[in-house]
Amino acid sequence: MAPAKANGRGVQVEDTRICVVMVGLPARGKSYIAQKAQRYLQWLSVPSQTFNVGSYRRKAAAQPTADFFDTTNVEGERQRKAAAEAAVADMLKWFKNENGVVAILDATNSTKERRKWILEICTRAGIEVIYVESRCDDENLIMANIRDVKTTSPDYKGQDPEQAALDFRNRIRNYEKVYKSVNDDGDEEHLTYLKIMNVGKQVIINRIQDYLQSRVVYYLMNLHIRPRSVWLSRHGESMYNLDGRIGGDALLSPRGEQYARKLPDLVRESVGDDRPLTVWTSTLKRTIATARFLPKHYNQLQWKALDELDAGLCDGMTYQEIKDEYPEDFEARDEDKYNYRYRGGESYRDVVIRLEPIIMELERSEDILIVTHQAVLRCIYAYFMKRNQEKSPWMHVPLHTLIKLTPRAYGTDEQRWDAKIAAVSTWRGKGSTAKHEDPVPSALH
Amino acid sequence: MAPAKANGRGVQVEDTRICVVMVGLPARGKSYIAQKAQRYLQWLSVPSQTFNVGSYRRKAAAQPTADFFDTTNVEGERQRKAAAEAAVADMLKWFKNENGVVAILDATNSTKERRKWILEICTRAGIEVIYVESRCDDENLIMANIRDVKTTSPDYKGQDPEQAALDFRNRIRNYEKVYKSVNDDGDEEHLTYLKIMNVGKQVIINRIQDYLQSRVVYYLMNLHIRPRSVWLSRHGESMYNLDGRIGGDALLSPRGEQYARKLPDLVRESVGDDRPLTVWTSTLKRTIATARFLPKHYNQLQWKALDELDAGLCDGMTYQEIKDEYPEDFEARDEDKYNYRYRGGESYRDVVIRLEPIIMELERSEDILIVTHQAVLRCIYAYFMKRNQEKSPWMHVPLHTLIKLTPRAYGTDEQRWDAKIAAVSTWRGKGSTAKHEDPVPSALH
């Protein structure tokens, strides 16, 4: 047997396959947790996929009423089991045919019998199982989730919102009749599980087996489902931007200064007056200068991890100079921008790795405004918006624009505020050495 | 107020101060956990210190008998409280005068009153408190700890081992009379705490506040206190070693081959026949070749994170060539070998960061044999043996030698097996460009 390989992050990808089995009543943030975990793992280049049993069930029963979920409803039970079987079958196919590493089975899995059934199937296929249960007895949080579901779930599309909320509450009640928390009776003590109580206030971790499991658990124990937003802005236009030079630690241009002075208005418009905000900048002059007129009562924190991608030997050069001096590097970077590492500097992949603690801290935090740099912003944006690694390094992120990202149960909402202060474009197309170039439409979103 | 700075690892060192308060009965591995946490943090450049209340108590009562720990013993109570006060006072001084970041208060802290007292003092001083409780009801583990204590604790030095064990059991009984597990009554629900049950089989995490706390918790949830050892070996002598070249991906020299063939015997002698062992190598040819004659039933795993320090542009050069071509770099590296980053390559600090998952996985694991490279071995060795960052990059790690490290409650034991196969020295003194140089005595240990 050839030795298994472990990748640079220490995640033993080739010999680990994990099925994360969500557990919990409806409206406990299960889908939210599932989607976040998947996004985080993919961002770290760990192949992962979510299998939502509800979407399989909808193929047979698109908009069932609450009594469909009553355990005495034989036909409902049959269809729901069939949906679970179809999801699990697809999951096994995915592990086998697409070298999947972490699958997330998103369903209530609220009975011991269902959990045991999944464990047996996975064990036979050599897949580790970790149960992730979300428990919540905070009525406000449950209500917020119910509101969210009735407006976003396909189960209630086109229905009267009040009626939908009522039906959904009845559905929850049907689940409550049979719901058993993991190891509540003490006979699931041998299982690997994570219980998240009241959105991360308390976490119980049982029998975590290996490194990848412990990474997933570490991420999930840092999550919360309180509503919040993340605001992103690049620094104002810098003197280096004007020259088309990369890297460095330049000051703001006069128009960049204008943006710094306008940023508090933009933030007020977007955030509101009474919402406390924490501001993170990099340690470079241009982000600190951009954030310096923000309200004094905002907490500010400088992170080295938010510094721009290190261009190494190419720091301070224009793309034309790089092409002239290091033609092979110039070409190699265009070939695979995500993985290309500047001589003595960094790749996008390196930036993602150093941003991991930032993402972890962002997940722990309430409202945050991040003032940072083009490449760093692309990586953070890719995390929230699930952009793929091939495309995100080519994404257009305009100067003098405030971006608001709001995580929801089924994705992340985006809003932008244009400060309407002209700035050069720092976007660059493949092969180009132009100082300032208009982005092509595909880079705009 | 100037913005707080966060370092490259994302640990917000300058504005976070944490007191880790150990909780638990004697013989539950508290000192072991405390010392490990401190070692890990220091290895990651987070200033940390352990304050062991027992060693303060010993100043007044060097070898008290069990009745000293009876709560009805007024004089005993007074002296024990005085010891706690002295330890806490020194801890506060350390935070203030030495910019401490994480202090670990190693004591039983087994009553609510004691925990409340510490919380109040820390809160007044702006220090966060996290309680780390070790619970254990596995008699075998407790007995192993008692055996360990009676042979290593200064409380029982020079005493009859049987008598010591008996007395220690009585001491535990006295603690059991007053011991309250954290939040057992539900009125410590507001505290930040971590409960480690039966050495990591289950972990409860309550109200973790910030990133550094979550790092500490993540490390501690991966610990176990089952006895085990870690074996370290460099690859056999390589063709590059003969030439005095660094880096590369060379094959073994004839003497290196000899070492590879002898390694199974060395391992058998050190590990024994019936103990299962997992072997980790780097992804480079010389470590894989060195491990290839080990027993087939050993699991083998290749880790990219175990590859040699990347010398970037200097890869494949001799030190003389480096000095000729990059004289400033050569000098800068000798000036601060831990922090110097090769152009386009890595520093020792970089290696430590990429080794963190390896350390985490090592902590989770049973017996492991690591076949790796000089700089990587130095970093791993520094972690286990608490070597400081200035000295560890200069440490002599001979070729063709098997090192066994066994973590104990009060430090790590080391044993070495010399394969008695000649090899060049790859050690290099400050300023030297010699191909092969005898290590000076200070580098030997």
Image (tube, coloured by chain):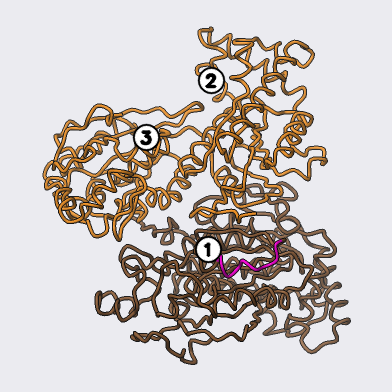
Chain colours: A brown, B orange
Residue pointed to by mark 3: B274
Q: Nearer the viewer, mark 1 or mark 3?
A: 1
Query: Which residue is pictured at 48% across the width and 86% down the height?
Result: A443
Determine which residue is flagged by label 1: A282
Which residue is rendered at x = 69% and y = 48% of the image? A187
Identify the secondary structure beneath mark 3: loop
Q: Which residues are magenta?
A: A288-296
**Three-letter code, disc 1:** Ser
Label 1, label 3: how many angstroms apart (C-alpha)?
Answer: 54 Å
**Residue A414 in picture, x, y percent from top left:** 64, 80
Name the N-terminal-most of marks 2 and 3.
2
Characterize the local packing of mark 2: few (<14), some (14-19) or many (20 or more) Cα atoms within 10 angstroms: some
Around disc 3, counting alpha carbons within 10 Å, would you say few (fewer than 14), some (14 to 19), or many (20 or more)?
A: few
Q: Which kind of residue does numbered mark 3 sit on?
A: Asp
Quarter of the image with the N terminus of chain A is bottom left
* Residue A105 visible to an observer of this rendering: no
Residue that sits furthest to the bottom in the current view: A441
- Place residue B50 in its image quadrant: top right
Labels 1, 3: one chain: no
